[in-house]
Every structure is written in structure tokens, then in C-alpha cells.
Amino acid sequence: MSDPSRFARTNHIPIMRRLPLAVLVLACAPWLATAQATPTVISLSLDQAIQTAQQNNPQYLTAVDTRDVAGSQLRSAYGAFLPSVSAQFGSQYREGLQQLIAGQRFGAASDQISSTYDITVQAQYNAAGAIAPKLERANVRAADAAVAGSAQRLRTAITQQYLNALQQAARAAMQDTLLTAARAQFALAEARAAAGAVTALDVKRAEVAVGQQEVALLQAENQAKIEELRLFQQMGVRRPDSVQLTTTFTLETPPLQLDQLIAMGRNANPTLNELRMREQAAQLGYRSAQSQYTPTLSLFTGVGGYTNQYTDRDFVLRQRTQSKQNLCLNQAGNDPAAIDACNGLTLTPQETSAAIADNAQFPFRFQRNPFSVGAQLSIPLFNGFQREQRVQEAAAARNAVRYNVHAQELQLEADITAAWLNLDAARRTVAIQERNAAAARDAEFYASERYKVGLNTFVDVAQSRADRETAENGRISAIYEYHRAFALLEDAVGRTLR
């Protein structure tokens, strides 16, 4: 019989011990809930964002897949020098029914099963095949440049969106600072109203200002989350619950001059390099079209075999017996006794086994077909001016790519020059906006101090705070416009400059 006291010790906590434990759980419950609800903050630098985008962005991965296709086409162009090999195997069943053709019966009276095999080796060589590897190699280099261009454009897009997220976070921080100032002014207005220095109108205006600033802060923080969401969308991954952007940008001028940047862009810009590779491929395509006037050499050879087996065993034995009798009759001459003896011949057991074994060919006891090898040289003479049309189309495509290269060179110089001018203007704008923001902060401070001693009204304080908000927004916009201009200059050059 079980001991009740043992059950109580092992399955229940004594009342006196449960009370402190319950009190401890209740006391720690708010802290535990807070710890579970607090999301993990993910730190994200610009380089990490770019690396993640290169691994997950769909558009960039599509460009990488295109490069893989170009590589397979290059292998196929080299593979054209190797002969093509094909093999086939077949089997057939034929009913044992004779056919009447021109009054004669053909075919065996027994059903037949047969099989065949054939291995064919062919090769073709012409001028177009010799040009194809060079053409596909140029296409591979163009695909490499396209991947580099896609990577550069992706880097620019991620940098721009990263800057947008940082700018909106800075605006939210600025709105938070303004909210703190508005609350301080609201408290000051209440204190002065209690002292009889101002009317209740100033208190209401200060309260309205706090509410408006709370709305501005809420909208700024919401927009900051949206910009982060768009950043992770371009990266190709989901946005985590909480993220902190860690990369900081400094106001620095590129160490190179404009002419140096243009020269660098002519060598490094991936879009221009891709067009140059396309020009080489178009030139080779034109030569390939011209090669249609040259002859083509074809080589071929092959081996094969067949089997044929009668399904009627008695038919096989009758055929073998008839052959034996016919051979005997050919040797008997006109002797009646010999002829009768030949007609009475039958197969021995050994001959019967041999006949059955010789008939058992299906499916793999092949009889080899005669070996053959051949060569053919074909010379194109006239095909209704189709070759001339293809040559003209290839020449037009080559010229179009050349024009595109020249247009891209002009656009490259214009883009780099415009980006350089925009960067210089943005740098000077930042300096001006810094002075404006500093002056606006001083003006707000003076207005607040004068309001404390009753030398101006709350309207002056509210106006100075609005002026500061405008100036701070202008300063933040100018700073990040400078960084965006720097990123656009890097995109135009085709490489990083920091």
C-alpha cells in the first residue's frame, strides 16, 4: 500500500514554500513581460546592406543568371568543334503473312521479331563555326560588364535608400528635440499664467504647440519606419522588428579633379564597358554573316547491325531440312534412287540444335552492317539574296552599337560633370544651411529668454520655433543631398570614391 505522505512530498509543494515563490513570480512578471516584448535591435551598416542585397535582390540575381547563360553559350561554341554522336536502338514484330507482288509471293510464313542498332558520328566545319567562340567570348565579357553594372546600380540604389532612412531618422530626432522644447515652453507658460504674468491664451497656444509637435514627431517616426521598410525591400529581405543604421557619412570632397574623374569613368564605367563588348560582338556577328559565302565541310561515319528471328520453331526446322535436301539433290544428278534418298533426309539432333541456336538472334545477337565513312563539301551559290539581307542586317546592328558607344561616352562625360557640379553646389549649400540653423537656434533661445522676462509674447516664441524647424529641416536635407550627390557621382564614374 502506497504511502500518502510520500505522494505529497514528491508531487506537491508545501503551502509555506509556495507562498514566497508565488510572490516572487508576481513581482518579476512585469520585468519578464518587458524582456520578452523587447525586440532585438539589429545593427546594419551600409556595406552589410549592399552585401545582403547582392545575395537576395531579384534584379541583380537575374543579371547573374544571364551571365551563366552566356557562359553556357561559350561552351556550346567550343563544343561545335567536336563531332555529334547519336545512337538508336529499335525492335519490330512482323506477322508471318506472305505478300503477292507481280504474281509472286514474298515473305516468310512464320512470324518474325527483329532489332536494329545504329551509331552515327557527324561533324561540320565552316568559317562561322570558327568565329563563334570569339563571338561568344565577347558576349561573356559583355555579360560580365552587365553584372558589374547591375552591381553598381544596386549599390547606388541601396546607398540612396540608406541615406533616405538616415535622413528621416535625423528628422525624427529633430522633431523629438522640438517636442522637448515645446513642452518646456508649455510648462513656462503655465507657470507665468499662475503668476499672473500672461493670460490663459498663452497657455492654450503653448498646449496647441505641444500637440502639433507630437503629431509632427509621430509622422516623422512613421516615415522613418517606412524608409527602413523600403531599404529592406531593395535588399530583398524582410525588415526586422528593430534595426539601427550604423554607417556615418562625412562631408568630404573627392580627392580627384573633374578631368581625372572623367578619365576614370571612361575606363571603369560598367555600362560603357558593356557597350564596348557589345560592339566587339556585333563586329564578330558581321564577320559571321559574311562567312555564309564560304563552303562547309561535312564528315560522317557510323556503325550498325540487325537481328532477325522466326518465332515458329517448326518453320525454322523445315527451312533447314529443305536446305539440306536441296544440297543433296544438287549432288544426286538424275539418279532416281539418289533423288528418293535426298527427299527422305531429316535433321540429326545436332543439326536440329544448331538450327534452333542460329535462329535465336533477338534481341542482341546483331549481324554487323558494312562500315562506311564519307565527306561532303557544300558551296553556297545563290539563295534568293537571303545572305545579302543577313549581312546588311548585321552591318546595321554593328553600326547601331557603335553609335550607342559614342552616345554613352558623351552621356558619361555629361553625367560626371553634372554630378560634380551638383556635389559642389550641395557642399556650399550645406555650409549655408549650417549657418542658418545655428542662427535659428540662437533666435529661438533669445525669444525664449525674452519670454521668460516678459519682453515678448508667446507668438514670438512659436514663430522662432517654427523658424528653427524650417532651418533644421533645410540643414538635414542639405547634408543628405550632398551624400546623395556623392553617391550619384560614384555611380556616374562606375566605382567608389570614398
Image (spheres, helix red, strand yellow):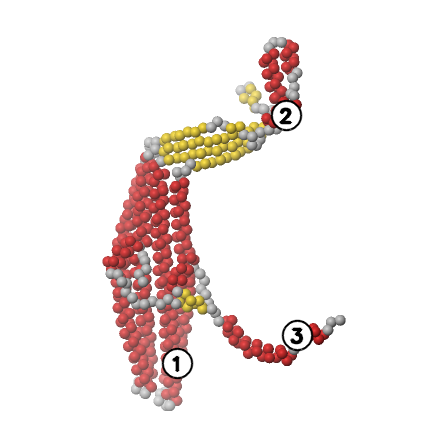
* Extreme-bottom residue of the structure: 195
Residue at (64% x, 11% y) in the render = 338
Residue 314's spot in the image, x, y percent?
64, 24
Circle nearer the N terminus (2, 1)? 1
Q: Which mark is residue 480?
A: none
Q: Is residue 489 above or below residue 125?
A: below
Circle nearer the N terminus (2, 3)? 3
Left or right of 7 on screen, residue 424 = left
Residue nearest the viewer, comparing 388 with 267 = 267
Specify the quadrant of the image occupied by residue 487.
bottom left
Circle nearer the N terminus (1, 3)? 3
Residue 234's spot in the image, x, y percent?
40, 60
Which amino acid is tagged 2?
Ser
Cα separation between marks 2 and 1? 116 Å
Residue at (62% x, 9% y) in the render = 335
- Labels 2 & 1 near each other (Cβ < 8 A): no
* Extreme-right residue of the structure: 1
- Quadrant of the drawing holding the N terminus: bottom right
Q: Which residue position holds label 3?
A: 12
Q: Secondary structure at mark 1?
A: helix
| Label 2, residues with CA under 10 Å away: few <14, some 14-19, many ≥20 | few
Q: Is residue 421 above or below residue 399?
A: below
Q: Which residue position holds label 2?
A: 353
Q: Which residue position holds label 1?
A: 183
Q: Secondary structure at mark 2?
A: helix
Which-is-in-front pick, marks 2 and 1?
2
